[in-house]
Image (tube, rainbow, N blue to C red):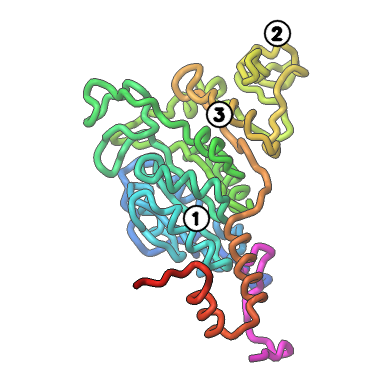
Amino acid sequence: MSIDTTVDLGLPTVGTDGVPTLPEGEKQTGKDFTSDQEVRWCPGCGDYAVLKAVQNFLPELGLRRENVVFISGIGCSSRFPYYLDTYGMHSIHGRAPSIATGLATAREDLSVFVVTGDGDALSIGGNHLIHALRRNVNMTILLFNNRIYGLTKGQYSPTSEAGKVTKSTPMGSLDHPFNPVSLALGAEGSFVARTIDSDRKHLTSVLAAAAAHRGTSFVEIYQNCPIFNDGAFDAIKSPDTKADAIIPLEHGKPITFGPVDETTGHGDKGLIRSAGGGVEVAQVAEVGVDALLVHDAHNPDPSTAFAISRLTDSGYLNQSPIGIFRQVDRPAYDDQARAQIRTASESATAPATERLAGLINGGDTWTIV
């Protein structure tokens, strides 16, 4: 069937990534993305701050609500789809990246988000997470890390620190915790970042960069659980300690932190190359600004980004690099899959019945006698 292109069909404008955008001049606000469901998290939960930031950030994408989808697994964070006026699915434990992979591959016209927690993503869902990252499917994964199992009432999680005393580890956890950013970089994620629930400006800027990225974007969000793990991130939130606890990462800038030295305009501490090839903390006054490591988030080799991620909790609890660790371009799985299908369809000139008969009577057949 041919379509008369001279007739205005009222079809949506399609952006460069294939997702329909709003008509020119039409605006949305956070209220447009807020559902009528009562938000049910514990008072003081960091999820509230993340939800509000996401609701206010989504209008900036300029996408139609019906073309935005949130897929979640199991856990407190996985209630997210209920509170957004978009399409969504509260799916099964640890499998949100797999469901999102199928959706993103089948529907190029959708902007797909995954919301998960440290238990959901890194325990039962660990295998699904790493394969989504290595495939580089077009989706944005938001991992809320509160270092505890909150929904099931306070057991230790894959990111709980060694020695953590919980209901399931009354004598202290014996497990070595995952570093989610290190794991994502090890799986060669093309966009890997870390941010904080209470820092609205930084959180929003990271979300914007993640959503704009073509491929899998992985964002770890430090999120406080006031009931079962309160104060887990006090060091990076307290005005008295956060200057020394947060190592800010900005592409193209020397990596420094700590109280700002008025002479250099940089923090009094910075990162330099270590003798072993990794990175280490040094006093800027001793090594000089020129010796500092300049952050390169676009480096195709993830080795330096991985070395920086290993500084997490290295000084005292909650000393953490914060920002975009890696942001590189490489082919996306779903784009390539659709290209293969188009190529196969264009080359298939024989009638469908003949193609089916060719498959049935092909060389890889057996005769049963």
Q: Is residue 354 above or below residue 359?
A: below
Q: Foreground mark, 3 or 2? A: 3
Of labels 3 and 1, earlier in sequence is 1
Q: Is residue 81 above or below residue 176?
A: below
Q: Foreground mark, 1 or 2? A: 1
Residue ID at (55%, 61%): 111
**Residue span colored magenta:** 1-20
Residue ID at (44%, 55%): 98
Q: Amino acid at mark 1?
A: Phe
Q: Which residue is mark 2?
A: 286
Label 1 and label 2: CA atoms lie apart by 45 Å
Horizontally, residue 274 falls left or right of residue 230, namely: right
| Position of residue 170 measured from the top left corner of the image (x, y, whole percent) | 22, 24
Q: Which residue is mark 1?
A: 113
Residue 270 shows up from this direction: no
Of labels 3 and 2, earlier in sequence is 2
> Which image quadrant: the N terminus?
bottom right
Horizontally, residue 169 falls left or right of residue 349, namely: left
Kindly check if marks 1 and 2 are in contact, taking CB atoms under 8 A apart as contact: no
Q: Amino acid at mark 3?
A: Ser
Q: Is residue 362 above or below residue 337?
A: below
| Position of residue 200 measured from the top left corner of the image (x, y, whole percent) | 53, 42
Residue nearest the observer in this picture, 301 or 52: 301
| Position of residue 361 measured from the top left corner of the image (x, y, whole percent) | 50, 76
SS under mark 2: helix
Q: Which residue is mark 3?
A: 309
Residue ID at (54%, 23%): 311
SS under mark 3: helix
Kindly check if marks 3 and 2 are in contact, taking CB atoms under 8 A apart as contact: no
